Image (cartoon, grey):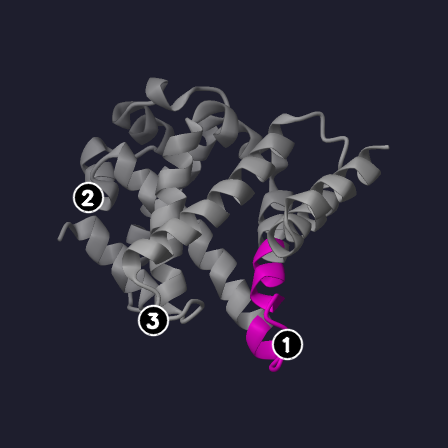
Amino acid sequence: MSQGEKNRRAERDGGRVDRRVRRSRRAIIEAFDRLIMDEPIDQISVSLIAREADVDRKTFYQHFGSIDGLLDAIAEDVVTELLDKVEHATQASPGGSDERPLRAFLAALTEHLSKNLLLGQRYCEHVPSELLLEHLARPLVRQCVDRGFVSEAIPDDELEMLLAYGLGGLFSLYRWWLLSDRRLTIDEVTQLACQLVEDGLSSFLEESARMLR
């Protein structure tokens, strides 16, 4: 296990990590966010990120190992933030309907995107969609199982298929919105996402037609 993975695991488990380690890790992620605003990912090198973050290449490799590892860490942070909010919402409302976790997830996603719509748009423009989805899917599948959001009785291959299907649809919908003229508000897109998942395609099409009139 690399030192970077040890540090990330310690942070996830609540372990004590040196402040300088957390600070340099955050500086690297923020540097990447600034670079992705202007450059496609295939034009962003480790050297460029390190220079932007004011760290040396060795520090980058210690934390992330590669740009692929950096994307994994960013996706892990995003998924953890979203699912922490889902857990909080579902625990705060015991006995809620079966749809509660879905609605809590979409509400958390809406809040996350609303913090920086432009950055979300640039990620969609500058990182291939299949790469984004791949990095988001891995921690989402793992954490949904670890947190008990899905039944342990579902075989792993079926679970991955079901979550890939659901995540793929939601990812495509929000990606479309971020790259559109945003005639619909993000709250309306979230409403459509709930409609699509809970009531099926025909209901989704009826609702989207009504909103676009």
Q: Nearer the viewer, mark 3 or mark 1?
A: 3
Q: Which residue is mark 2?
A: 62
Visible in this render: residue 31? no
At a point 63% along the width and 49% down the height, the residue shown is 200
Residue 193 among magenta residues: no
Would you identify the image quadrant in which residue 85 lies?
A: bottom right
Residue that numbered label 3 is attached to = 153
- What amino acid type should be assigned to the residue bearing mark 3? Ala
Quote the CA–CA distance across marks 1 and 2.
44 Å
Q: Position of residue 152 (x, y in %)?
A: 34, 71
**Which type of secondary structure does the marked residue at label 3 adopt?**
loop
Amino acid type shown at disc 1: Gly
**Percent of width and height locating residue 195:** 68, 51
Query: Which type of secondary structure does the marked residue at label 2 adopt?
Result: helix
Which stretch did the figure color magenta?
90-106
In the shown orientation, is residue 46 left or right of residue 115?
left
Placement of the C terminus among the 4 image quadrants: top right
Q: Amino acid at mark 2?
A: Gln
x, y percentage for residue 67? Answer: 28, 33
For label 3, count other residues whose C-alpha is less than 10 Å away and answer few (under 14), some (14-19) or many (20+): few
Q: Going by the picture, which residue comes out furthest to the front?
A: 202
Q: Please tell me which residue is depicted at 58% across the width and 49% down the height of the picture.
A: 112
In this rendering, the answer to whether 47 lies above or below 208 is above
Q: Which residue is mark 1?
A: 96
